[in-house]
Amino acid sequence: MATTTIPRSRRDAIAKRWQRGRSGYMFLIPWLIGFFALTLGPALASLYLAFTKYDVLTPPVFTGLDNFGYMFFQDYRFRQALQVTFTYVLWSVPLKLGLALLIAIALDKGTRGVDLYRAIFYLPSLIGGSVAIAVLWRQLFDRDGLTDQLLQLLGWPPGTSLLNNPDHALKTLIVLSVWQFGAPMVIFLAGLRQIPQHLHEAARMDGAKTMQRFSRITLPLLAPVIFFNLIMQTIDAFKAFTQAFVVSAGTGGPIDSTLFYTLYLYQEGFAFFRMGYASALAWFLLIIIAAFTALTFLSAKYWVHYDDGR
Amino acid sequence: MTTVAENAGFDPYREARARSKALKQRRDVVRAIIKHIVLILSSIGMLYPLLWLVSSSFKPDTAIFSDFSLIPEAFSFANYVNGWTALRTSFTTFFTNSFFIAALAVIGNLMACSLTAFAFARLEFPLKKLWFTLMLATLMIPYHVTLIPQYILFLNIGWVNTILPLVLPKFLATDAFFVFLMVQFFRGIPRELDEAARMDGCGPWRIYWRIMLPLSVPVMATAAIFSFMWTYDDFLGPLIYLNDINQYTVPLALRTFVDSTGVSAWGQLFAMSTLSLLPVFFFFLFFQRLIIRGVATSAMKR
């Protein structure tokens, strides 16, 4: 931050700094209002509401730890929502990142038509979060849908709806998430381009096999990018909402098999108007995400090395 | 094995070397072909659901689930015509609402986020580090934590069932991601430029308006494109705040379409879904480079 201007007297500098300080805050006014009124204030308010019973119509009633007691010890739908969400995260994120990395490596090293492939693979990421795609997914996996017809070819009875089957409904949403591997792939590709080619050549000279070069050069040098993708994709997966909502018509069904955490939160807050309990759910989600992020950051010490230094 | 350099006289290694080179070349070609076959097949697999959606939107309902082919036997726009007015309110209204909200979101984000980013990137003021850290922290907070109190706030002001709760936050730079993106970009602009301007007596506003903004077209375009696409696709916000069908955005209308019509109107539903994807698709077509670079740089600059 060293300025290259001519040194002035100290007094002058302080005056100047204050003057500039004022204009700094002028520029910051919109953000400051937004931060206090729409982020910090509401976050603290929901922290308070988490310890109350609140139905919007009557003022909130402080109930201590009741919400959390109910959540952890009695609420089976909460447990179901956690289970669905963790299953979703633990399957979709590794599959998505694995596929993204695989395709990125296949596309690296001057494959002809790289731009076209990249565009095709990226397109689903761009539109995958929309209601239109959720609608499409519902039709693909429902009775008479594309999968039904494919399964008939494999000898399944006609009229199979994977979506109405509690054993399979969540899988269709995992597939939908993996289908959108394009965004992390684009990031992997950018990361791969930064790996100096001469490292690979030197290793090849020394007789290193493809797999060796992958595990000794590509993976370590790509670790920061893998780390970034892992954090981003996991947070996104925890927050998944639209697709489960549309595909299950807002119910999280069949029999709560697609009851994502955020969907449950929405139901509690905006369908049953249990705003206090929904706030408790929201804060618990924040804690889960924070805990996960912290764990990943801690683990990074062992597998992510920036630059060359350890 | 074909011998490539059969009469290559004296060098005993030459023949072997040439043969291994030819072998390697052939192996590379075979590999490349296999790779492209795999890539092409997976591209088709990736696009198949989308193509199926588009082609189904041109088929009569009876043919959608009986006809595997992507090219409709009878090509008809009937689904588009009927679907457009299938709900109580026509899609003209829904698209107008969506575009209006998205346009305001773009304007709000560009103005507010660039002001904030300029302050963080170029101005000195007390507590700057603290504010910057807090700004980055908001990137990590899931919006669910603020969702309910925000709703209660807007409910009490009487803004529920207006577009204000969807638009106003953008004018207050609540999208920290864009602030972050712009701070990164502004930091890359040579400081000498604004130092020189300051010498000539330019205040911070002039520097922001006359120097930074004109030099920041790429990042502004990226932010504008993503603002538009994310607002246009947003579902939860409109779901919570808009109750009157005349206020609905396209995603809400589609969802109503799914829930209200029976099994009968798939074709119309597909037609409207296809239309709803077109704006984002065109953005992708025209600004592909900016979008992909935006995605890539968001990760690389940390």
Image: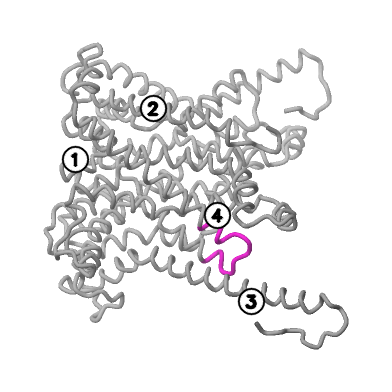
- Work out whether B163 lies above or below B90: above
The label shown at residue A38 is: 2
* Mark toward the start of the polypeptide (1 vs 2): 2
Q: How many marks?
A: 4
Q: Earlier in the sequence, mark 3 or mark 4?
A: 3
Is B226 located above or below residue A39 in the figure? below
Q: Which residue is mark 4?
A: B290
Tag 2–tag 4 contact (CB < 8 Å): no
Task: Tell me which amino acid carries mark 3.
Answer: Arg
Rendering coords of residue B197 (x, y %): 73, 37
**Chain for numbered disc 4:** B
For label 2, the SS is: helix
Identify residue for label 1.
A256
Marks 1 and 4, Cα distance to the nearest angstrom? 40 Å
Q: Is residue A115 a member of the stretch shown in magenta? A: yes
The reply to whether residue B250 is visible in this rendering is no
Q: Which residue is mark 3?
A: B26
Q: Residues within 10 Å of mark 1 (few under 14, many from 20)?
A: some
Mark 1 secondary-structure assignment: loop
Specify start and end residues of the magenta stretch as a single range.
Answer: A103-116
Q: Looking at the picture, how far across and down is residue A253, in whole percent?
A: 18, 44
Q: Chain of mark 1?
A: A
